[in-house]
Amino acid sequence: MLSAMTWTLALTMGLVPRSEPLSAAAVLEAPTRHVRATGHTVPGLLRTGFTQSRTFAALLQRLERSDVIVYIEDVPRLPGALDGRLLIQPAAHGVRYLRIQVALHGSPFDSIATIGHELRHAVEVANASTVVDEQGLADLYRRIGMDYGNNLFDTIEAQEIGRQVGRELQHT
């Protein structure tokens, strides 16, 4: 059962699915899934996040019901002090493509929380159907987020989602 805080957070951030929840297999293994991982580490982190964090599972389910396909890749390092970032790729045939890069440092739970943070950004894009290119992405984050300069943006919602996922993982 969702805690009152998690339920409120999920409702206000548009994460509660409008229909029946999807199974782990549908979200993590189907050939047509919308969140895909490269490498060997990320798939296990996605499975753990899905099974041990309701917030993380809600993010994946929301993306599964969108026109966005997200590729998540583990990279050795990112610019500056970033642990993760979201990039937009060219859209094709009515599908928008995003790439999440994460530098997996610390515990698996820390990495899952970072992925959750970035998946929240993917949901933000999924919720903004006009975002189809880098300019649209920058415009979205200038409108809904905090601009740190040099095309670095963040949102309060993504920060809170990362913390919420971390709390849920600690209580399993």
Image (cartoon, rainbow, N blue to C red):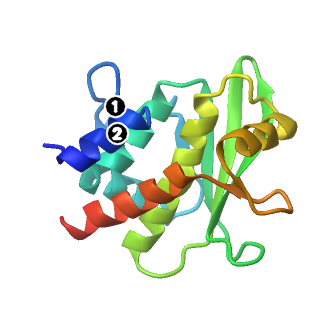
Give the vertical position of 114 relative to 19 (above or below).
below
Q: Are marks 2 and 1 in contact (CB under 8 Å)?
A: yes
Q: CA distance from mark 2 to mark 1?
A: 6 Å
Residue projecting furthest to the left: 1
Q: On the picture, is 134 further left or further right than 122?
A: right
Q: Picture coordinates of residue 77 (x, y %)?
A: 70, 76
Give residue 52's quadrant in the image. Answer: bottom left
Which comes sooner in the sequence, label 2 or label 1? Answer: 2
Q: Picture coordinates of residue 118 (x, y %)?
A: 56, 54
- Label 1 residue SS: loop
Q: Is residue 137 visible?
A: yes
- Label 2 residue SS: helix
Q: On the picture, is 34 further left or further right than 14?
A: right
Residue at 28% from the left image edge and 29% from the top image edge: 21
The label shown at residue 16 is 1
Residue at 18% from the left image edge and 44% from the top image edge: 2
**Quadrant including the N terminus:** top left
Residue at 34% from the left image edge and 43% from the top image edge: 9
> What is the three-letter code of the residue carrying label 2?
Ala
List the residue tagged with mark 2: 10
